[in-house]
């Protein structure tokens, strides 16, 4: 443990208003902490720069999951366990439910939150590709009001997001239009449990009259931010899936992603596996893959 | 809910630990693991990695399995905690403790408290877990000695004999 | 022979109850009044002269105890085989993370910042990081030639073979460093008192190693150093020699500050600064007849020892002696050497050189099979040692071991032939390639050659006032079952119940030196001494006419109680005696290397997923002949745990080095297998007995580490048709090899089995 607890201030406001006032009052000084599964690791390693932490763990409005006909609104402090336990998430948003089940062990799933995962903005995060393909929108709040942000614009660069210093993510909104899609989530890590992704894929596809009517692909760990593979999607959409197209799709994937060599893996490996995962998805979609 | 004014003094944290109410003076950002071990003298909960990977520090917080090395004390204020010391009752071993002994589920013992807490939590949700469910329930607890097999046998047997009694 | 009532049954683990209730006390659970906390300032460069040390601003240094080399009362070294490793860098550093100075303070939270605030200026020197650089000798970093130790082992005459051999098979094989990753990190508490001397309590395997090192470092006589082992949360060799260093540090701080000092490493410090398994490189050149018999060969075995000698000569020795495996080599020349590099010294890790040389050998045997045109099974079968034949050191196999029959049983248990055939049919159409592979090996238990005689271990069994009996050994419990099995042995020898026997906590003030808890010697060698010492108690009571030929446990206790009441507590001691038939030539490295070998055949079944290049071990059969199983649950636990670690060694555990420093020193980034990565490991034993071991037991603690890696890589080659000769073998390596094999044009696509 390389941090000195005596150097830290903390606050536990009992309302959202309290949290937001604090963030507005001293912008950039207070770091919101939810379940702590990312921040406390940094803290223990002695690499947490913030010295003031404000808890958003126990605010009921951030722990709700609200279901309407059009969308599911997931409170930012909902844990992976909350996601896995929710009937609609399990049935209609399998990519997110799968990602939640792959994030750490049970103890970390009980504390890790979807909002924390987004704000921590690791390109390797398991849930974020799922949010990209589901076309998520974020409800972002501050004392200045609330705004709705398309998630695909949220990540600006490596661990940099659109979030202003006085803002908080209140909820993640997922439009309910993908339940009839063929969905596949794949995570490739160094081992079968408790692993950071070397590559991960969230994929949705729909065939109509033998042609790809819609294709939505997103990957983690292949770029500085979670990446939507728009070029690959573009090449595939409107065409029938056959070996030539799959080969083209592979090439598109490899040219679209920007993987690196790091401690965990190599760029070559990531590129190869990314291409393999997409090829596998397309082949299974073509083989009559029904909603999983 | 209470509000602590921003401060660098220690503040009072109230906890229920293994059924007993205690008040501790601690810095808000002390790890709950250290509050248990250093302030309360409950050294049964162990540190193996300090990064939430090994599960040696696992306890129940409000009935939920958590890694106590990742919980700041100020977020545990008012919580109901169960640690390994709270499982045996009146000198009688809890069922899991019994089966761990019978099946070789403990070798060096350092992962054992966290492992038993994780198993206890699993059995409270799934009284008759399949091997796959045991594996998933304990996937956040690393053991370097046993290769897991005899741990899983112990958990399965505890399930067969009556779960979390 | 009387049937045994206790030995051979799975009695409850002696200290188990404390472990499952959280009562067991490990070093970080212990607190002494007035205790302060220590931390270590370490080097950031791999090699250089220390120019200046400055203590930065923002810290009240007056409140810290500070220890530098000038505070060392004795010799600035951690005494082991040589005295070359300084306790604190003596003006020069030879590795990253070398200890430079020590700090202590009552508030443990102030230490990390204080450590950061000490700045060290260096005149850097050129550093070397690989065995090859060390061999080139462009930089001499240790001794005259960078070589800690070398051995030459010769049998018969190799040179004439090459001319007429039908086949000459060559190969080079490598293994990487491996971190022991005990879940409890290194820790120590020290307390010094001018009267009593220095006491240390800690997580350790060998109390007397620490004792010897502290005497020299602190210039204290034997009776003024006391070492107490506390409950130890895993060791695997990683706490064989390193604890002497951390005990030295805590001891010096205690002496300087006048307060008890606790040092506990966090995971990052433990991983980056302490010992790991020696990386190795083995080169084989083997002359083989056309019917697949080994005519002879040359084996070059080289290990990377890091910056200081520590135990490298012994790791080298064991690795070299095991490099011929369970086969008959009529002629062989083995050149073994341990070389220095600018990295933290490598050290003991379960297997201790044998996993490295046996990986090479068992991969090489598959290669030999291919060249000769025989199956992996057949090539081995034709070369197994038979009773009456001699090993590579010229030791005659005296037991009636039939390794061929062991092989047959392993093949049957694993369904080897049927699976091999099924996979050959199935693989061409699948993107998930399956393979099955095997490894045959042996592991010598106890210290090599004259080692046990040199150790001259002493064991005590003491009769207590309440009539119970107490075992006194310096052998430590760290999960492998020392306490349980030694008490079983004593109880059996004395005709008592398991509950009638206690064992003293290893404390150098209390227990004799039964040798270090290493080398798979505890049950076999120390256990046999416990048997003798226990018999000594019985003989004393019988000689006094107090005990008849047969008696009940209650009668024994009553007699013991009254004897002790009359004469006081008495101890029966037993000292190791080398068996007469164990003759060893230390110079020529020939003769009886070990009192007993355990023999094994392991079979691994794997699936390689060509989408992800991940390897999954689907099934594993571990069959071994171990003399005698004294405790079925513990024995099985040792094998499963060892196989799991070896699967990590083969497929997952990579130390990422950069200029001699481990870059992935966190559990997130150093990948050990979880339960989701392990198959059901099926364990089977055979028992031939062992006259040199307690109740016929042979050592088994390290055996399971030797076989899995080559069996797995053999299986992967079977699955993919591509040889791999280096571990850890990661998916990235498999991808690179397959991609290269296929060629640049068909980038990535054909690797998945498409045309």
Image: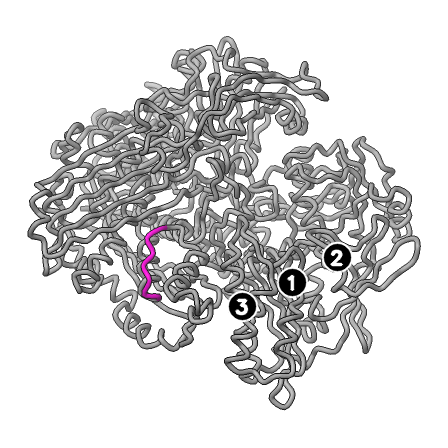
Start-end of magenta stretch: C720-726
Instruction: Report the Cα–Cα distance between label 2 and label 3.
Output: 29 Å
Please state the chain letter of the residue tagged with numbered disc 3 in the rendered image: A
Is the residue A273 above or below the residue C30 in the image? below
Mark 3 nearby-residue class (10 Å; few <14, some 14–19, many ≥20): many
Question: Magenta includes C254?
Answer: no
**Residue occupied by mark 1:** A100
Tell me which label, 1 or 2, sits earlier in the chain. 1
Q: Is residue A207 left or right of residue B109?
A: right
Please state the chain letter of the residue tagged with numbered disc 2 in the rendered image: A
| Residue lying furthest front | C745
Which residue is painted at 68% across and 75% down in the image?
A91
Residue C433 visible (yes or no): yes
Magenta stretch secondary structure, dominant = loop
Disc sitting over residue A115 in the figure: 2
x then y, percent, for residue C245: 46, 25
Instruction: Report the Cα–Cα distance between label 1 and label 2.
Output: 13 Å
Q: Is residue C267 left or right of residue C345?
A: right
Tell me which label, 2 or 3, sits earlier in the chain. 2
Looking at the rendered structure, the secondary structure element under dot 3 is helix
**Residue occupied by mark 3:** A275
């Amino acid at each position: 443990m390389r941090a000195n607890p005596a150097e830290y201030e903390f606050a536990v406001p009992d309302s959202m208003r309290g949290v937001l006032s604090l963030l507005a009052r001293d912008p950039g000084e207070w770091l919101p902490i939810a379940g702590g599964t990312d921040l406390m690791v940094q803290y223990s390693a002695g690499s947490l720069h913030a010295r003031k932490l404000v808890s958003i763990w126990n605010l009921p409005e951030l722990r709700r999951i609200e279901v309407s006909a059009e969308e599911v609104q997931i409170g930012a402090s909902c844990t992976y366990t909350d996601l896995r336990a929710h009937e609609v998430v399990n049935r209609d948003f399998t990519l997110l439910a799968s990602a939640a089940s792959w994030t750490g062990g049970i103890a970390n799933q009980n504390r890790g939150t979807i909002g924390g995962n987004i704000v921590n903005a690791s390109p390797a995060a398991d849930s974020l590709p799922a949010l990209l393909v589901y076309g998520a929108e974020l409800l972002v709040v501050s004392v200045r009001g609330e705004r709705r942000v398309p998630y695909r614009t949220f990540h600006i660069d490596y661990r940099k997001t659109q979030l202003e210093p006085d803002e908080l993510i209140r909820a993640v909104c997922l439009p309910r239009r993908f339940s009839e899609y063929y969905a596949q989530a794949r995570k490739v890590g160094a081992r079968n449990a408790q692993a950071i992704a070397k590559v991960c894929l969230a994929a949705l596809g729909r065939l109509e009259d033998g042609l790809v009517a819609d294709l939505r692909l997103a990957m983690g760990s292949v770029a500085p931010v979670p990446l939507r593979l728009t070029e690959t999607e573009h090449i595939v959409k409107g065409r029938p899936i056959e070996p030539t197209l799959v080969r083209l799709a592979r090439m598109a994937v490899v040219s679209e992603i920007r993987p690196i060599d790091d401690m965990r893996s190599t760029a070559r490996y990531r590129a190869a596996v990314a291409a393999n995962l997409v090829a596998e998805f397309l082949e299974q979609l073509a083989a009559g893959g029904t909603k999983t | 809910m209470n509000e602590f004014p921003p401060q660098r003094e220690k503040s009072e944290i109230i906890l229920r630990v293994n059924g007993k109410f205690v008040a501790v003076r601690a810095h808000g950002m002390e790890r709950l693991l250290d509050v248990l071990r250093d302030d309360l003298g409950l050294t049964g909960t162990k540190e193996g990695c300090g990064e939430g990977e090994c599960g040696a520090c696992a306890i129940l917080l409000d009935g939920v399995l958590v890694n106590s090395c990742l919980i700041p004390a100020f977020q545990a204020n008012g919580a109901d905690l169960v640690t390994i010391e709270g499982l045996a009752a009146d000198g009688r071993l809890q069922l899991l403790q019994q089966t761990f002994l019978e099946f070789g589920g403990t070798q060096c013992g350092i992962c054992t408290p966290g492992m038993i807490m994780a198993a206890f939590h699993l059995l409270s949700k799934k009284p008759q877990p399949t091997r796959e469910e045991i594996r998933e329930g304990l996937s956040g607890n690393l053991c370097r000695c046993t290769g897991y097999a005899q741990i899983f046998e112990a958990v399965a047997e505890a399930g067969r004999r009556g779960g979390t009694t | 022979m009387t049937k045994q009532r206790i030995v051979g049954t799975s009695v409850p683990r002696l200290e188990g109850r404390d472990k499952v209730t959280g009562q067991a006390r490990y070093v970080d659970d212990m607190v002494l009044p007035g205790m302060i906390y220590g931390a270590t300032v370490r080097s950031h460069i791999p090699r250089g002269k220390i120019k200046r040390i400055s203590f930065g601003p923002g810290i009240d240094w007056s409140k810290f105890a500070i220890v530098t080399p000038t505070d060392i009362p004795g010799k600035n070294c951690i005494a082991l085989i040589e005295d070359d490793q300084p306790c604190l860098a003596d003006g020069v550093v030879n590795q990253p993370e070398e200890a430079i100075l020590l700090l202590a303070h009552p508030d443990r939270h102030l230490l990390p910042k204080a450590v950061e605030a000490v700045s060290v200026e260096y005149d850097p020197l050129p550093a070397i990081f690989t065995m090859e650089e060390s061999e080139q000798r462009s930089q001499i970093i240790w001794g005259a030639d960078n070589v800690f130790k070398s051995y030459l082992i010769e049998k018969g005459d190799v040179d004439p073979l090459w001319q007429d051999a039908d086949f000459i098979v060559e190969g080079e094989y490598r293994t990487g460093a491996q971190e022991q990753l005990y879940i409890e990190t290194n820790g120590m508490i020290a307390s010094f008192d001018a009267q009593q001397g220095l006491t240390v309590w800690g997580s350790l395997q060998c109390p007397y190693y620490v004792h010897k090192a502290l005497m020299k470092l602190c210039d204290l006589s034997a009776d003024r150093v006391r070492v107490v082992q506390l409950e130890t949360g895993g060791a695997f060799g990683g706490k064989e020699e390193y604890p002497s260093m951390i005990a030295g540090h805590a001891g010096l701080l205690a002496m300087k500050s006048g307060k008890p000092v606790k040092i506990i490493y966090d995971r990052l410090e433990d991983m980056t600064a302490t010992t790991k398994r020696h990386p190795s490189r083995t080169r084989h050149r083997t002359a083989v007849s056309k019917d697949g018999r080994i005519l002879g060969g040359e084996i070059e075995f080289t290990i990377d020892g890091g910056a200081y000698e520590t135990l490298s000569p012994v790791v080298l020795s064991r690795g070299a002696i095991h490099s011929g495996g369970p086969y008959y080599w009529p002629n062989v020349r083995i050149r073994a050497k341990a070389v220095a590099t600018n990295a933290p010294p490598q050290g003991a890790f379960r297997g201790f050189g044998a996993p490295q040389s046996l990986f090479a050998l068992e991969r090489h045997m598959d290669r030999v099979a291919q060249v000769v045109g025989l199956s992996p099974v057949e090539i081995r079968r034709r070369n197994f040692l038979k009773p009456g034949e001699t090993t590579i050191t010229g030791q005659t196999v005296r037991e009636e071991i039939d390794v061929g029959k062991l092989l047959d049983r392993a093949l049957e248990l694993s369904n080897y032939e049927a699976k091999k055939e099924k996979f050959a049919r199935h693989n061409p159409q699948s993107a998930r390639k399956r393979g099955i592979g095997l490894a045959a090996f042996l592991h010598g238990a106890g210290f090599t050659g004259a080692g046990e005689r040199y150790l001259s271990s002493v064991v005590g069994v003491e009769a207590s006032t309440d009539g119970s009996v107490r075992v006194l050994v310096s052998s430590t419990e760290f999960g492998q079952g020392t306490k349980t099995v030694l008490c079983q042995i004593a109880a059996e020898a004395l005709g008592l119940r398991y509950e009638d026997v206690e064992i003293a906590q290893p404390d150098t003030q209390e227990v004799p030196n039964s040798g270090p808890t290493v080398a798979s010697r505890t049950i076999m060698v120390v256990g046999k001494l416990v048997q003798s010492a226990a018999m000594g108690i019985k003989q004393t009571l019988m000689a006094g006419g107090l005990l008849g030929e047969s008696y009940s446990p209650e009668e024994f206790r009553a007699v013991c109680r009254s004897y002790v009441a009359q004469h006081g507590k008495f101890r029966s001691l037993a000292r190791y005696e080398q068996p007469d038939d164990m003759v060893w030539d230390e110079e020529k490295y020939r003769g009886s290397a070990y009192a007993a070998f355990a023999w094994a055949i392991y079979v691994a079944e794997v699936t390689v997923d060509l989408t992800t290049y991940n390897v999954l071990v689907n099934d594993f059969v571990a069959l071994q002949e171990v003399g005698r199983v004294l405790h079925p649950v513990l024995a099985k636990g040792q094998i499963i745990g060892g196989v799991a670690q070896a699967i990590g060694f083969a497929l997952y555990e990579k130390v990422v080095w950069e200029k001699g420093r481990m870059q992935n020193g966190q559990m997130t980034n150093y990948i050990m297998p979880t339960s989701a990565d392990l198959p059901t490991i099926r364990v089977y034993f055979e028992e031939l007995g062992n006259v040199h071991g307690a109740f016929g037991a042979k050592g088994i603690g390290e055996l399971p580490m030797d076989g899995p890696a080559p069996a797995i890589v053999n299986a992967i080659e079977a699955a993919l048709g591509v040889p791999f000769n280096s571990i850890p073998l990661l998916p990235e390596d498999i991808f690179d090899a397959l991609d290269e094999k296929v060629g640049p044009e068909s980038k990535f696509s054909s690797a998945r089995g498409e045309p």
